[in-house]
Amino acid sequence: MSSVNSNINSELFNRSQKVAPGGVHSPVRAFKGVGGSPLFFKSAQGAYLTSVEDQKYVDFCMSFGPMILGHRDADVQNSVLEMINTAWSFGACEPYSLALGEWLQNEVPHLEKLRFVSSGTEAVMSALRVARGATKKNKILKFHGCYHGHVDNMLVKAGSGLAGEAVSDSAGVSAEVADSTIVVPLDNIQALEKAFAVHHVDLAAAIIEPLPANFGLLPQREVFLQALKDLCLKYNVLLIFDEVISGFRVSIGGMARILKIKPDLVTYGKILGGGFPVGCYGGRSDLMELVAPQGPVYQAGTLSANPVGMVAGLETLKKIKTNSVIQVINERTKNWTKKLSEAFQTEKIPISITQFGSLFWFYPNSILMNEPSKLSISSTSSLLSTPITKISNWNNGYPRSIEEFPKNTADVYKTFFHELLKRGIYLPPNAYEVGFMSYAHTDELLDSLIEKFVEAGRISAKI
Ligand SMILES: Cc1ncc(COP(=O)(O)O)c(C=O)c1O
């Protein structure tokens, strides 16, 4: 069992707080959601992170998604080293982005044309600008609980959404910008229909994570996503799928392929750069041809299509395809979460798991917390991994909107997280972030962790 030597971490964190706001360069890293000082890591390999105190942790955060092959995959590493020995930035035309771009066009039919940028946020910001430029309309509809990066008008959750009285989640976002965002709850077709009926005249686009995975894991019913597509068509509103997490993880063509729903525009990041800063937006060529220099919508970037990211991304995607990585890790995740759920059930630990593909999310079953005698935890994992054609049957017994969360979600997770950390397991440091499986997490490794999860579950549920 690892023990966390908090002295070195605390010392580094104290110094970091003098350098960066909250000591971090992205908020969740500060452990605010789980308490305590964040760990500092010095290296990573396969499924493991190594801290500055030389403690090894099994990593289920995986840099929040990009490391689908595991850390420092040897093939990706070789392609990166080869590139670095050649050049690492041109600011000019080069063949590396062309190779990745053509690969993507071949594999993802709705990517008729695309543009590389340096992050998911940039991809979303640019896609929204294209949508406004194309439609000459200003408002964007988004869903409560979906995260689309730190674009001003996406930092908005539900106010009284239908009236457009959305309130920003962040200081520094003007009321005018927040007001241009219409927020609708997930999984509520009626609210969606109303929002379109009221706002369609001003709506440029509707944007959704087709597999919402930033406020827990909230797989949507197919009928809901189809209703969104139909309303977009009916009211002439562009549909944007934000596949920054789901792209290349649930399938090479993302959720769009699984659902057989064609978005007008799509955004990618994370896996696409193989762990380097790469984002991409693309879709219908008539829309993408509005982008400068071909069209009037301006968008540019000094390090866009950086060759190191391009070769890392292409090597990652090719390997995912050649080794059937998605199928392999989906199956692993399904089997493992099923075993974990069964172990929780046997031990009467009131924690449920939602699993979809290689993503998973732990949340407390609050009814069971209050009434232990009624214990009957059912793993949602088997429901969620039903074949694609049965998506409409997902509709049973697991949260699909943030309104359904048990009140004690964050509290239970804090203890669960720290108990696992003590046992050498690193989950994302926030109750609402999902867990990520990688190709480097073997069945043997996963099986060896079950007892540790049970111990942590017992302690966090106080049983
Ligand atoms: C669905 C989604 N969209 C956009 C973003 C923003 O991407 P980035 O952090 O690369 O700016 C994220 C990041 O987590 C995301 O999950």
Image (spheres, grey):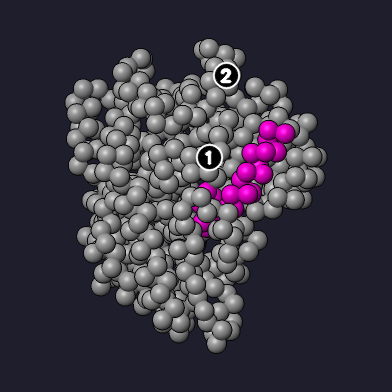
Quadrant of the snapshot with the N terminus: bottom left
Q: x%, y% of residue 425?
A: 32, 64
Viewer-side residue, 9 vs 445: 445
Say which of marks 1 and 2 sits in front.
Answer: 1
Q: Residue furthest bottom?
A: 373
Quadrant of the snapshot with the C terminus: bottom left
Q: x%, y% of residue 204?
A: 68, 30
Q: Are marks 1 and 2 in contact (CB under 8 Å)?
A: no
Residue 69 horizontal side relative to residue 432, left or right: left
Amino acid tagged 1: Lys
Query: Which is nearer the N-term, disc 1 or disc 2?
Result: 1
Residue 88 horizontal side relative to residue 362, left or right: left
> Dot 1: what SS?
loop
Residue 123 horizontal side relative to residue 166, left or right: left
Residue 260 numbered mark, or none: 1
Q: x%, y% of residue 161?
A: 74, 47
Viewer-side residue, 336 vs 120: 336
Q: 344 above or below 291?
A: below
Q: 185 above or below 300?
A: below
Task: Give the residues drawn in magenta, as a range.
Answer: 211-234
Within-10-Å neighbours for mark 1: few <14, some 14–19, many 20+: few
Is residue 219 shown in magenta?
A: yes
Amino acid tagged 2: Asp
Q: Which residue is mark 2?
A: 286
For residue 308, what is the image quadrant? Answer: top left
Q: 279 above or below 97?
A: below
